[in-house]
Image (cartoon, helix red, strand yellow):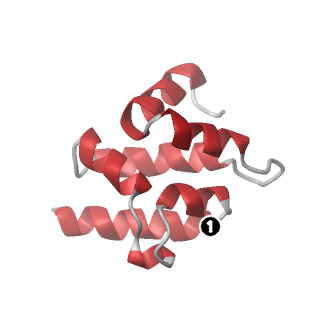
Amino acid sequence: MYRDDPLDDEAELRAVVGDEPVDRLLDADPGREREPIEVALDVLRVLQGWVDDEAAGRWFVATQARLERRPPVDALVDGAFEEVEDAARAWAAAQG
């Protein structure tokens, strides 16, 4: 991971999103320029600027029309990083 204390970041993501989704992000096919868990943490930081952790956690696992009716976790596992980031920004802006 790229942050100062990756264990704290992972623990925070687990607390917000849950263990199973984070395990799926960690088990995703490696070898990409960015890892799904890194993108998920960046998205979490965006969402935390607009909504509480409970709402952010629900967003990660709920189907999203902007992601072809997939949950963001599934889209991240599939490597749709930019699409998830765009969907998160649009959703967060709509909450304000």
Q: Residue at 57%, 67% (x, y): give it.
A: 82
User: Which quarter of the rendering shows the N terminus?
Assistant: top right
- Other residues around mark 1 within 10 Å, as few (<14) / some (14–19) / many (≥20): some
Q: Residue at 23%, 52% (x, y): give it.
A: 50
Relative height, residue 40 to residue 63 (above, below): above
Indicate left or right for 91 with 88 as reference. left
Q: Which residue is mark 1?
A: 80
> Where does the image place residue 94, in percent across and percent down from the top left?
22, 69
Relative height, residue 69 to residue 88 (above, below): below
> Where does the image place residue 52, in percent across and percent down from the top left?
22, 43
User: Which quarter of the rendering shows the C terminus?
Assistant: bottom left
Relative height, residue 46 to residue 75 (above, below): above
Q: Secondary structure at mark 1?
A: loop
Q: Amino acid at mark 1?
A: Ala
- 49 and 22: which is toward the camera: 22
> Where does the image place residue 18, in percent across and percent down from the top left?
44, 36
- Residue reaching furthest to the right: 31
Give the mark count: 1
Indicate left or right for 22 with 45 as reference. right
Specify the quadrant of the image occupied by residue 4.
top right
- 62 and 91: which is toward the camera: 62
Q: Residue at 53%, 71% (x, y): give it.
A: 83
Specify the quadrant of the image occupied by residue 3.
top right
Indicate left or right for 85 with 38 as reference. left
- Residue reaching furthest to the front: 20
